[in-house]
Amino acid sequence: MDKLRDFLKSWPGRILLMLCLAPLALLGIEGYLQANTDPNQIAQVGEASISLNEYQSAVNARRTEILEELPDASLLNEEVLHEQVLRGLIDRKLLEQQAKKLGMTISDDTINRLLRQEEGFKDESGEFSNERFSNYLRQSGMSKDQLFAVFREQLSLDQLNASIVGTAIYPMQAVDKMIDLQLESRRVWLHRIDWKGYTDKVSVTPAAIKQYYDTHKESLKSQAMVDLDYIELSPATVAVPKVTEEDVQQQYTAYKQSAAGADERELAQILVTGDDAKKKATDIKAQLDKGAKFAAMAKQYSEDPTGQQGGGIGRFNPSVFGKDAGAVEQALQGLKVGEVSAPVKTSFGYQIFTVTKDDGVKVPSLESMREALTAKAAIYKRETAYADKVAAINDLAADGFSMQDIAQQEGLKVITLKNYTKDNNQTKLSQPTVVNKAFDDFTIHDQAVTTGIEIANGTVWVQPNNYRPIETLTLEKATDTIRQTLLQQEATKLAVQQAKAIAKTIKTPADITKQSVAFQALGQVTRQAPQFTDKERGLAFSEAAPKDGVVALVAETETGATIIVADPIQTQTESPISELQKAGTAATIRDILGQDQLQDYLEYLRLIYEVKINDKNMANARGR
């Protein structure tokens, strides 16, 4: 197993894992190879096709991968997931065909040579083992030809990848320059002017609103929205029956079964069967009570094969006795070494037990665990009640009951969210899973109650109504939005004018304190200073300052205008970054540039190989 594990860490092992066990991550592309193709196509890419089975397998694998990283399953955006997987599969088909067209292939001799170098396929003497290789193929469910085909295809893609990504160039001189820029610093004073302070100085006329509307009419769209009714349920709000003594006993039995390995007592048994089994067991027990040796009696009377060895059955394991485990446990309770139990009726017959060895480890008594068992029983009952309630509401939703009817029957409150939007949703139910269900075509058309949607703290059911699709706003509906936009634009112009007027009067650090507005002294800062917005960060080092003076810079921002006053730029004489770190930085940048080149190349391939997507099959695959 260790050698197999090492093999899976090697290049052929990783290839096989990627192709056979998980979504293929090739250059940021998620794909998934399938040996068998489904006649129902999702897409045709040049001469290759993407089957429904291939697509669904890739989606499921990618979904599983993402859910392992997400704290809340409702945060998964199914629309984005499907789009990314489809694009990944198409990208892979494009690259596969181009690699074949360019003659990029790997010979059997090369694959054989690489496989023979793998430690996982070598025997104890270090030689390639055909037996280990054959065992691996059997475990993988692949023939040698299939394995070679998989490797050849992947290595051909690697060749094409290297020829695209590997050509990216980012010289060390550029790295040095970039590092030098990051090492620059200067003293900075900052003042921001809010456009809202100038709104009383501007006005927006109806003519200006009309002109803006006529110019931007096509971009003035309403949002898709519904009025959303919903009910929610969480484990904490479910009514739970009180914990009974039977519940506690069940938890104790379950505990003993799970902790059976903690009971170190070793047992022997005598088994008798037949119509007179009860009488025979009673007679045997009487003889044992009078001093008969248990092992001798087992050899003479036990009908179990263990009788010939004195009846020894090892440690007690409740699972062996199934539904009779409780009766056996009761008979064994408190038995010490050499003591004999009363006859116990089980599905095997009548059994008599004795303890042959006891290392002293005992299962705690019920009373000593009562508090913990009661708490566990309460949790179990709550989880069960919650699951039952979720199932009951799902059944009502499936039967076509309205939200109001379901709420009334289940004792829940209907909550309504007015103007629930598909995009930029900021409500309590902004999770992508909920939004997608609320705007599902079927749900909207039938105004149906969805099945339960799991969110972080429970489950919700939603019912959309009053659907308003995206549409171009009328002048009347767009007026308020346009007025606000124009008001901000005009007020921002005044803020910028004021900022420029102030900046003109600042030539030295002493001038800063003479202004009617207060500047914030940030001290010596670098380009990474957290006090800056992105726009301000670029402005702060955009111009040099006179040797004994300062430079005052102005920029329009989202909130109005910013004035940045800065003295001459200083650069550290020694870089804290080693040559090795510089080389690593250059390599990282080259990889990023290479990925950009790859995306450009994929766009080029889309011009060469026609891509057709079967929208109907795609909709079916997405459950629409």
Image (spheres, rainbow, N blue to C red):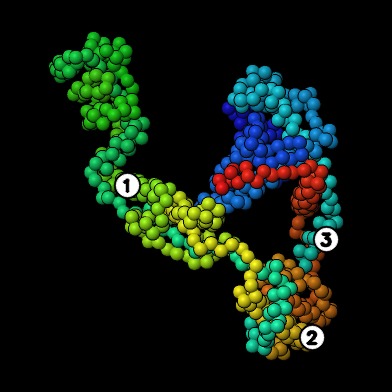
Find residue 177 and name its label: 3
Residue nearest the observer in this picture, 559 or 578: 559
Query: Would you place residue 334 above or below residue 509 in this image?
Result: above
Q: Which residue is mark 2?
A: 504
Residues tagged 1 and 2 counted as in contact (Cβ below 8 A): no
Q: Please tell me which residue is depicted at 78% across the width and 48% down the height of the picture.
A: 603
Residues tagged 3 and 2 counted as in contact (Cβ below 8 A): no
- Secondary structure of the residue carrying tag 1 is helix
Circle 3 or circle 1, nearest the eye: 1
Q: Left of 211 or right of it: where is 332?
A: left
Residue type, mark 1 in image? Lys
Q: Please tell me which residue is depicted at 68% across the width and 34% down the height of the picture.
A: 15
Residue nearest the observer in this picture, 264 or 133: 133
Residue type, mark 3 in image? Lys
- Secondary structure of the residue carrying tag 3 is helix
Circle 3 or circle 2, nearest the eye: 2
Q: Which residue is mark 1?
A: 381
x, y percent for residue 379: 34, 48
Report how far apart the C-alphas of labels 3 and 1 lie in the structure. 66 Å
Q: Left of 27 or right of it: where is 317?
A: left
Quadrant including the N terminus: top right
**In the rendered picture of this protein, how many numbered marks are placed on residues?**
3
Q: Please tell me which residue is depicted at 24% across the width and 46% down the height of the picture.
A: 244
Residue type, mark 2 in image? Lys
